[in-house]
Amino acid sequence: MTPGDALLIVDVQRDFLPGGSLAVPGGDEVVPVLNRYLALTRRTGLPVFASRDWHPADHCSFRARGGTWPVHCVADTPGAAFAPGLQLPADAVIIDKATRPEADAYSAFSGTALAGMLRERGVERVLIGGLATDYCVLNTVRDALKEGFRVLLLRDAIRAVNVQPGDGARAEREMLDLGAVSAVIEEYAS
Ligand code: VGL
Ligand code: ZN
């Protein structure tokens, strides 16, 4: 990690962990890995951003409204809280997304101030991990690249929903094809 880097943690929330309403298999396994990346940001003073899926109770992505998903990440409910044990610093910038009933947003850049905040802080490269590989991580990486940031995909800190088998692997392939570079924590641990 070098000046110009920022860590972006995507949607590591209780509803996406085993036992949650939209559980991502192995979703809890990203928490200790992200904590190691967070320790690196503490040592280097680099900024940390964390997005939250933050839906109203009648969100259009919910099945009761004809959407794809069970009710999940309703704003200010326990399921929308960050994963227990995720060691976010007090000055982490929280990005709420998909907050309006009529629109879904998988990307942390969609309808948020994220791109401007990153630029304001001089960020050129975004280190991205979180949940889920095949939805919010994929769409966030696509947008980060479109916005002109370089992307380091934290390959050991992502997990996929895999509604269709192979969705996660295909998403990883696409992110690398688009220009993201992948890393694992062992490449940084000293
Ligand atoms: C997500 C499905 C529905 C995600 C959010 O964070 O990847 N997936 N809403
Ligand atoms: Zn959602």
Image: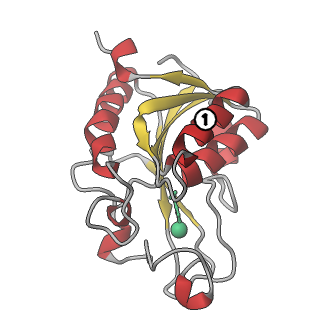
Seen at 53% across and 31% down, the residue is 153
Q: In the image, is residue 24 above or below residue 36?
A: below
Position of the C terminus, as image quadrant, is top left
Residue 177 lies left or right of residue 153; in this view the side is right
Residue 69 lies left or right of residue 142; in this view the side is left
Q: Residue furthest front?
A: 165
x then y, percent, for residue 146: 78, 39
Disc 1: CA contacts within 10 A as few (<14), some (14-19) or many (>=20): few
x then y, percent, for residue 135: 58, 54
Could you say which is closer to the camera, residue 147 or residue 138?
Answer: 138
Q: Amino acid at mark 1?
A: Arg
Q: Residue furthest top?
A: 190
Residue 11 lies left or right of residue 67; in this view the side is left
Q: Name the residue tied to disc 1.
A: 121
x then y, percent, for residue 16: 38, 61
Q: Residue furthest left?
A: 85
Q: In the image, is residue 106 above or below residue 2?
A: below
Seen at 67% across and 36% down, the residue is 174
Q: How is the image coloured?
A: secondary structure
Asked if one can make out residue 89 in the rendered structure from this viewpoint, the answer is no
Image quadrant in which you'd find residue 58: bottom right
Asked if one can make out residue 83 in the rendered structure from this viewpoint, the answer is yes
Image quadrant in which you'd find residue 99: bottom right
Could you say which is closer to the camera, residue 9 or residue 167?
Answer: 167
Seen at 35% across and 78% down, the residue is 77
x then y, percent, for residue 185: 36, 22
Residue 139 lies left or right of residue 31; in this view the side is right
* Secondary structure under the numbered disc 1 in the rendered image: loop
